[in-house]
Image: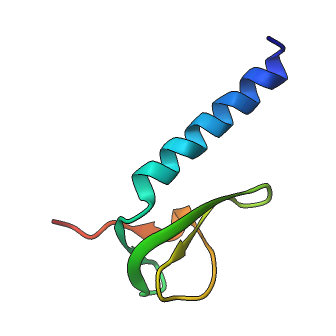
């Protein structure tokens, strides 16, 4: 399998794992908005982006914090 295909498959596998790990998880954004992750997107410019249930917009996954137990 060509190298490019291996890289694409790896990216898609990691994206699938991120979706299954993040969707439905409670998070707090660095701007103070909180809620559960509704969806995850792969953005070619920004990497992973998430949407929070009840809030408009998509945020980089780097802006979330997980609430401490």
Would residue 56 be found to the left or right of residue 27 on screen?
Answer: right
Would residue 46 be found to the left or right of residue 26 on screen?
Answer: right
Residue 51 at what x, y percent from top left?
A: 55, 74
Q: What residue is shown at x 49% (from left), y 42% (from top)?
A: 17
- List the single residue furthest toward the left: 69
Among the 4 quarters of the image, the one containing residue 42: bottom right
Among the 4 quarters of the image, the one containing residue 27: bottom left
Q: What residue is shown at x 67% (from left), y 37% (from top)?
A: 11
Residue 54 at what x, y percent from top left?
A: 47, 88
The image shows residue 48, relative to residue 10, as above or below, that is below
Q: What residue is shown at x 50% (from left), y 49% (from top)?
A: 18
The image shows residue 11, relative to residue 5, as above or below, that is below
How is this picture coloured?
rainbow
Q: What is the count of numbered marks?
A: 0
Residue 15 at what x, y percent from top left?
A: 59, 45
The image shows residue 7, relative to residue 69, as above or below, that is above
Classify the position of the N terminus by image quarter: top right
Among the 4 quarters of the image, the one containing residue 60: bottom right
- List the single residue furthest toward the top: 1
Q: What residue is shown at x 69% (from left), y 29% (from top)?
A: 9
Decide which of 24, 45 is in the foreground and name it: 24
Classify the position of the C terminus by image quarter: bottom left
The image shows residue 16, relative to residue 4, as above or below, that is below
Decide which of 28, 20 is in the foreground and name it: 20
């Amino acid at each position: 399998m060509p190298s490019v295909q291996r890289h694409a498959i790896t990216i898609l596998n990691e994206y699938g794992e991120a979706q299954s790990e993040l969707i439905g998880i409670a998070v707090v954004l660095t701007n103070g908005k909180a809620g559960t992750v509704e969806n995850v997107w792969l953005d070619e410019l920004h990497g992973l982006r998430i949407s929070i249930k009840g809030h408009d917009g998509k945020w980089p996954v780097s802006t979330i914090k997980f609430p401490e137990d």
